[in-house]
Image (tube, rainbow, N blue to C red):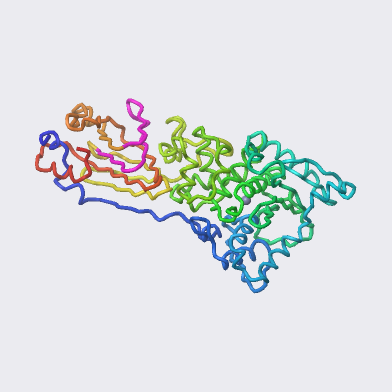
């Protein structure tokens, strides 16, 4: 062993671990300017925060200073703020509760039972079972027809399967309400509709989607897209019950954004493209800090062949790590979540994303680029639930790549195509070295690690997954200096 190991030695007589080392635990790309950035990872909020957000985005609340909004940041929709308020409702003063309820009651709630009993008061009453809509005077033109279309599209996706067996034929149903044209509307609010859950005791009795009269004049997309988003929030509320308020935004809003984009035959994808761009451009952001941009997470799972329709409504009442595990179950997510950021389908399907609302292939994050010279070592720490695309220039005759965690490596310029998921160790030989010595790496001792003739640049997509990933890349020369074998051993070498 000594004889073979001795051929791998650091250049210029410098021990590898003492040179150009870069140990990095990258700061997360949080966006504290968005209210989402101030919410705990499990989705919990304080009463003060819920009220400040509500005063900024829903309606004035006496004695409450509105949260300051960054006009350039993505802010929550009204539904999310109402969920936050719902979470802390028991801890608010009667005056604060009254202010919130006054806002909610200003919307004209259509009492479906009454509408059915007095059809002459309403233009029409349609739907039974999983959707009931009463068209009150002045209800937005086409809203009912659109909501029925959305309902039918969700039914075609199978999301109502099992609902009757849980709730029975008289279970909670979504209904549609209208906000009067002159009802208060905060400038910072981004969504012309919101969802309200109806609760009696501990039981959810239904939910309603309130629609502002100017809904189709908003830049957020078509009426169908808006209603599809809110309808998904309704379904979440019915399934999740009282834990609806607690759901973290990467679950509640990420799902709703994916659902609105994928439920209809003719999606209205511009905002979805923007949020998928946000996802793709920020691999260092923890999944648990994401909101609408978590559409990218569900899209990756969809791309891997697991339909989000099959599990999204089951994602509640669990800690964040368990929600994540439930979502990625039975997929190759840990093998390809990091490589997908490269947006290079010609390298293999794992090296690009897919699905609806995918931005142009030029939308790819900056890669961590580094040279690995003889005698140098680069170390990268990828935090849990983040990813990191890397580009490595091999400036040493021999390079040892070690991954503790999850990483996928490719070398599109190699003589033989290379794509190594779940890489543990790789010994990469520079082409000129291969030409000179036949890539004379120590094959005898690295039995499980075949030396690979590599081109000067290789790419590695690391996935933090549950416990984080550490990547080490070390450069060596080929020398016969037996006394340096200890250096190799100390560098986490497989032997
Ligand atoms: Zn929403």
Which quadrant of the view contains residue 482?
top left
Residue furthest toward the bottom?
63
Instruction: Tell me which residue sits at (55%, 43%) in the image.
Output: 314
Instruction: Tell me which residue sits at (58%, 39%) in the image.
Output: 357
Any part of residue 351 in sight:
no
Q: Is residue 410 magenta?
A: yes
Q: Nearer the viewer, residue 90 or 310?
A: 90
Q: x, y (%) of residue 102?
A: 73, 65
Which quadrant of the view contains residue 91?
bottom right
State left or right for residue 69 relative to residue 493: right
Q: Nearer the viewer, residue 260 or 283?
A: 260
Q: x, y (%) of residue 46?
A: 54, 65
If the image is split into quadrants, where does the C terminus sit?
top left
Instruction: Tell me which residue sits at (67%, 43%) in the image.
Output: 228
Instruction: Tell me which residue sits at (17%, 29%) in the image.
Output: 444
Give the residues in magenta. Answer: 399-423
Q: Nearer the viewer, residue 54 or 189?
A: 54
């Amino acid at each position: 062993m000594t004889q073979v190991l001795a051929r791998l030695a650091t250049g210029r007589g410098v021990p590898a671990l003492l040179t150009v080392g870069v140990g990095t635990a990258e700061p997360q790309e949080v966006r504290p300017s968005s209210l989402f950035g101030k919410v705990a990872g499990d989705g919990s909020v304080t009463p003060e925060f819920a009220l400040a957000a509500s005063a900024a985005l829903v309606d004035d609340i006496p004695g409450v200073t509105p949260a300051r909004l960054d006009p350039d940041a993505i802010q929550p929709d009204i539904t999310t703020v109402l969920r936050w308020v719902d979470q802390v409702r028991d801890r608010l003063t009667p005056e604060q509760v009254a202010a919130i309820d006054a806002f909610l009651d200003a919307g004209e709630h259509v009492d479906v039972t009454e509408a059915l009993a007095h059809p002459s008061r309403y233009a029409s009453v349609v739907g039974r079972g999983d959707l009931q809509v009463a068209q009150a005077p002045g209800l937005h033109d086409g809203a009912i027809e659109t909501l029925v279309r959305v309902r039918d599209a969700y039914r075609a996706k199978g999301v109502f399967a099992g609902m009757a067996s849980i709730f029975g034929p008289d279970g909670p149903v979504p209904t549609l309400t209208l906000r009067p044209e002159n009802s208060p509307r905060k400038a910072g609010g981004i969504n012309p509709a919101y969802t309200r859950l109806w609760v009696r005791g501990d039981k959810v009795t239904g939910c309603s989607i309130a629609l502002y009269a100017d809904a189709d004049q908003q830049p957020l997309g078509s009426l169908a897209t808006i209603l599809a988003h809110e309808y998904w929030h309704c379904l979440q509320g019915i399934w999740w019950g009282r834990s609806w308020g607690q759901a973290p935004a990467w679950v509640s809003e990420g799902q709703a954004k994916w659902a609105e984009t994928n439920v209809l035959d003719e999606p209205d994808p511009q905002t979805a493209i923007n949020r998928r761009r946000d996802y793709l451009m920020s691999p260092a952001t923890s999944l648990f800090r994401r909101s609408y941009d978590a559409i990218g997470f569900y899209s990756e799972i969809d791309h891997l062949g697991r339909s989000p329709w099959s599990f999204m409504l089951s994602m509640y009442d669990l800690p964040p790590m368990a929600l994540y595990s439930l979502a990625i179950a039975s997929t190759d997510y840990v093998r390809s979540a990091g490589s997908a950021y490269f947006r290079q389908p010609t390298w293999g399907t794992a090296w690009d994303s897919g699905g609806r609302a995918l931005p142009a292939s030029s939308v790819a994050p900056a890669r961590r680029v580094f040279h690995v010279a003889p005698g140098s070592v680069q170390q990268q720490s990828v935090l849990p639930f983040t990813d990191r695309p890397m580009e490595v220039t091999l400036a040493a005759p021999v390079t040892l790549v070690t991954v503790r965690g999850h990483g996928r490596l490719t070398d599109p310029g190699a003589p033989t195509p290379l794509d190594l998921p779940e890489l543990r160790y790789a010994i990469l030989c520079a082409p000129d070295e291969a030409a000179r010595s036949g890539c004379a790496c120590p094959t005898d001792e690295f039995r499980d690690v075949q030396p690979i003739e590599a081109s000067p640049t290789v790419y590695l997509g690391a996935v933090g997954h549950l416990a984080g990933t550490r990547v080490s890349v070390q450069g060596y020369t080929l020398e016969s200096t037996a006394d340096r074998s200890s250096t190799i051993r100390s560098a986490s070498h497989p032997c």
